[in-house]
Image: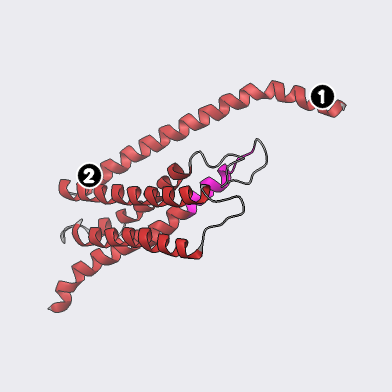
Amino acid sequence: MYGLVISDRLWEIMKWPLIVVGLLFVIALWVGIFLGMRWLVRKIRQRLSKPEFVALAVWGIAIFALSLAATLVIVHRAVALAPSGHLTNHFLVVWAVTWGGSMLLVSILAGMFVFRRATPWQVVLTWPWLVGGAVGLAWMVGLSGQMDAGSKLCDAQANGSCDNAWGLGAILLSVAAALVLGGTFVFTATLRRMLPRLRR
């Protein structure tokens, strides 16, 4: 009992400093993200012509929109299920083929038309991998509001949350999307460049 009293007093002493430190950390994180994105955009614009930069941005926005739509579709379907229900294999296959196929098709088209043949190889082989971040961001936006205890998609205890799983899922999905979609883009762009040389 005495130990609990000490713990409560310690928490009262430490609560506000911890809150302030947490807020400062979040603010610093967002400032860092903003400055990092600003630097990244500036670097891309220095390496690309204006049409290429616009086309690359359009590809990223299209992938984000498709990823967000795919996330919202499966979240809406899962939330609407009965407590004992589950997503059918047929739905999951159709969902994966529809949305995954759409994103692959968009990435193939982007790989064919975004970059000129004169664009440096360093750009072609590096910048497309950033598309993974668009997919991870779409995942986080689509699942926002569903990661608190009591949601059908979160089995955490009362007053808890599934934020760790939410963030980890976004990271893993970003890496996977970068490999698949970015890889598809790079492969298509490389093939487009190499074919004329092979014909000679």
Tag 2 residue: 45
Instruction: Bin the neighbour count of mark 2 within 10 Å (Cα to Cα): few under 14, some 14-19, many 20 and up.
Output: some
Q: Is residue 169 above or below residue 121?
A: above
Q: Nearer the viewer, residue 25 or 143?
A: 143
Instruction: Bin the neighbour count of mark 1 within 10 Å (Cα to Cα): few under 14, some 14-19, many 20 and up.
Output: few
Q: Amino acid at mark 2?
A: Arg
* Residue 4 left/right relative to 114: right
Q: Is residue 194 above or below residue 114?
A: below
Tag 1 residue: 5
Q: Is residue 113 above or below residue 83?
A: below
Q: Measured from the top left, where is residue 149 in percent x and y?
A: 61, 40
User: Magenta stretch: dominant SS?
Assistant: helix
Determine which quarter of the picture holds residue 187. bottom left
Q: Determine which of the numbered discs, if any, sits on residue 187 in the image.
A: none
Q: Residue at x 32, y 59 (%)?
A: 102
Q: Is residue 157 magenta?
A: no
